[in-house]
Amino acid sequence: MKNKQGKKYISIRSRLFLEVGAVILVAVTVILSLNNFILPAFYVYNERRNMKSVCGEIDDFLSTGADATQYVSQQEKNNSFSIDIYGEDGTPVYIGTDDIFSSGGKVTVSHRKDYDDGSFYETQTNLSSEKQYIVYGTVLSSGGEIEMFSSKDYIDTTSHTVVFIANTISVTALLLALVFIFFYTGRFTKPLIAMSKITGKMAEMDFTEKCELNGRNDEISVLSSSINYLSDSLNSTLKDLNQKNEKLKDDIEKEKNLEKIRKDFISNVSHELKTPISIIRGYSEGAVMMLDSGDEEAAKSYCDVIVTETEKMNALVLELLELSKYESGNIEISREKFDIYNMISEYALGAEIKFRENSITFENNVQKGIEGVGDTIKLEMIVNNYISNAVSHAGGEKLIRVGSEELSDCYRISVFNTGENISEEEKDKIWISFYRADKSRSRSEGRFGLGLSIVSAIQKLHKRDYGVYNTPDGVCFWFDIEKA
């Protein structure tokens, strides 16, 4: 397996197992080497030191003048030595009970070492029996000599046995240690491997998985807790960043829409003013011509058209000023209590002639006695715009019905008219200044497409909802009035 940089990937478990296993293998190798090369020599050295010590004890005992036969015999048994003692004149005082040279044959000496105190060590080999002996000899304080013989073959056999046992134990311990390390490294590295996977997912912005907390109070537990905290923190930050990005996108989109609306607004205002100005100019020139020709009646009719167009321009400017005032947010609204049913009835009474001229049937189904709170003058403008809009678009049986619905903290007033539905794509656009859902309507009706924009601005000042929806046989506009 390779990582992203192309290097060979080795898991932390394998690395830890190999490194710790290598350390233990080196240690066991050192122990085996010491056992095989140093332990036999150590046994020989230890045997020589023991022989020297026993010689000292025997010399001390002989200096007391006591009979040494039983004592020396006991030392032979205790130490597996063969001891020979000679007097000052060379006569035997004690000859070892185990005569190691009884088989006869030539004896050779190797590895002899003499010391300043007259003692010596040497290795003797009986060629006929091929047995080797360690020999230690020294001069006694009484003037005699003592020689000790120890079977080197016995020492070698003992050391080899010990080396074999030590080697077997060491190899067994190595194998058991490797098995233990294998399982221990798995248990030890499991949380680290899990952290590696989780941090890898975190790098890919996936914060769903968390590190398991094993309950231990150690660095791994602290690291797991820190990774979980980092994951939660990054996740929270990322969500917050995404939300801000979405909000920024929305703001940018709104800014683009506002810029488009601004351009459309300027274009629409220019268009709305261009037509009456052109008419006024044309009729002014015509009136001058009629006066020059003496046709006063024609000049008067031309002036009447100029006045009409001027009034339309004045109405447009007033509506624009009204809308600008509401949308600026600097205007303060009054809060007064009023009877909603009476407000609708009074408006309907004033618009009775308009209803009759357009063959409109008007119904006031607002619940009697309900009272609202708000700026009555501006709320009456909403009623005027909604009902005027309904009169212009009423079709079929030409019915306009005003109703009411009680909500938790407000009354929802609806203005329904029979006629064609508004398309879904136009439901949001109709609240934009100068937008007309019905492009075929003549400007002679005196409508500029600002009424619903004014409704939107007034309701925003009151911090209340408004809207429109289609019904099977018509369209229903609504707005909310705060309860008194």
Image: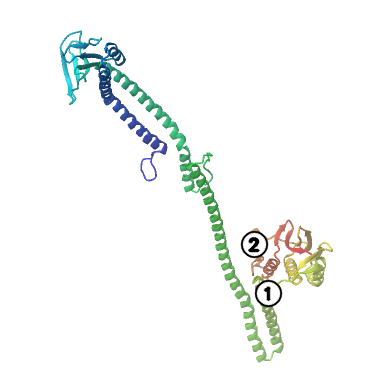
- What type is the residue that disc 1 sits on? Glu
Left or right of 162? Residue 117 is left
Q: Residue at x 68, y 91 (%)?
A: 294
Left or right of 336? Residue 86 is left
Number of callouts in the render?
2
Q: Is 320 situated above or below 56? A: below
Q: Secondary structure at mark 2?
A: loop
Instruction: Give the CA distance from mark 2 to mark 1.
Output: 21 Å
Q: Quadrant of residue 122?
A: top left
Q: How is the image coloured?
A: rainbow
The extreme front residue here reads: 65
Left or right of 12? Residue 398 is right
Work out whether residue 398 can be spotted: no
Q: Is 364 situated above or below 113? A: below
Label disc, if present, on residue 322 of the rendered structure: 1
Residue 335: where, in percent of width, then height?
Answer: 75, 69
Residue marked by disc 2 = 428
